[in-house]
Image (cartoon, rainbow, N blue to C red):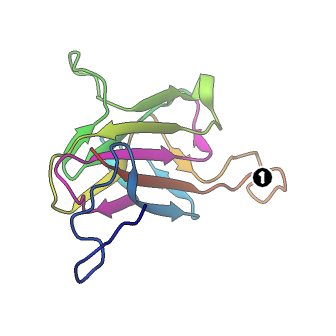
Amino acid sequence: MTTTITGATGIDNIKAATGAVLQVKSTFVGTTFSSTATAFTDMGLSVSITPTSTSSKILVSYNLGTVDVSADTRIAFRIMRDSTPVGVGSSAGSRALATTAATAVTQRGQPHSFQFLDSPSTTSAITYKVQQFNQGSTLELGIRHNNDPDDASVYRTGYNIIVQEIAG
């Protein structure tokens, strides 16, 4: 079988199979992050993508490496598509809407990962980012604390966000 591709770019009028990955974008942060913010706050973890079709879906994934919080602290994270939270739980009273959450007592020093398949229905540039919410004293990413911050047993991790355009 022979296929002829024409056009200036050589890919005019080609439609990818539904479910095919069309493009991948990512941001990796290797430095530590610390916050005492008690409202959802940007963490400097964002990535932009411009979908090629309004029928495309965007698979958003984040991995926060090692998350450390002070005792009796509750933390939450959420994905934002521009200024809109996506992949969050449903509204219930005054509870914060999040994609992942934990308490210091049960998940201190644990990674947080999440994936969400978004349907933005646009061909305009979109920025996805991760925000954090802290109900306590201090949240830190990228470091697992011990009594001595220079101790060899203190782990250093990075954190990232990846977006993939999936053909619709």
**Residue occupying image coordinates x 61% and y 22%:** 106
Q: Quadrant of residue 91?
A: top left
User: Pointer 1: residues within 10 angstroms few (<14), some, or many (20+)?
Assistant: few
Q: Residue furthest right?
A: 152
* Residue at x-position 51% and y-position 55%: 160
Of 124 and 78, the residue lying toward us = 124
Q: Is residue 148 above or below residue 89?
A: below
Magenta-highlighted residues: 46-71
Residue at image coords 76%, 46%:
147
Taking the magenta stretch, the answer to whether it contains residue 79 is no
Residue 61 x/y as whole percent: 45, 45
| Residue 83 placement (x, y as % from top left) | 18, 49
Would you say 44 lies left or right of 137 here?
A: left
Does 161 appear above or below 133?
A: below
Image quarter where the C terminus lies is top left
Closest to the observer, 21 or 9: 9
Instruction: Look at 25% across and 48% down and name the residue there.
Output: 56
Magenta segment includes 62: yes
Q: Is 51 located above or below residue 74 in the figure?
A: below
Is residue 13 among the parts visible in the rendering?
Answer: yes
Q: Position of residue 13 (x, y in %)?
A: 21, 64
Residue 92 in percent (x, y) is at 23, 16
Question: Can residue 38 be seen here?
Answer: no
In the rendered image of this protein, does residue 75 appear above or below residue 37? above
Mark 1 lies on a secondary structure that is: loop
The residue pinned by badge 1 equals 148
Q: Residue flagged by tag 1: what amino acid is it?
A: Asp
Lateral position of residue 14 relative to residue 151, left or right: left
Q: Quarter holding the N terminus?
A: bottom left
Outermost residue to the top: 92
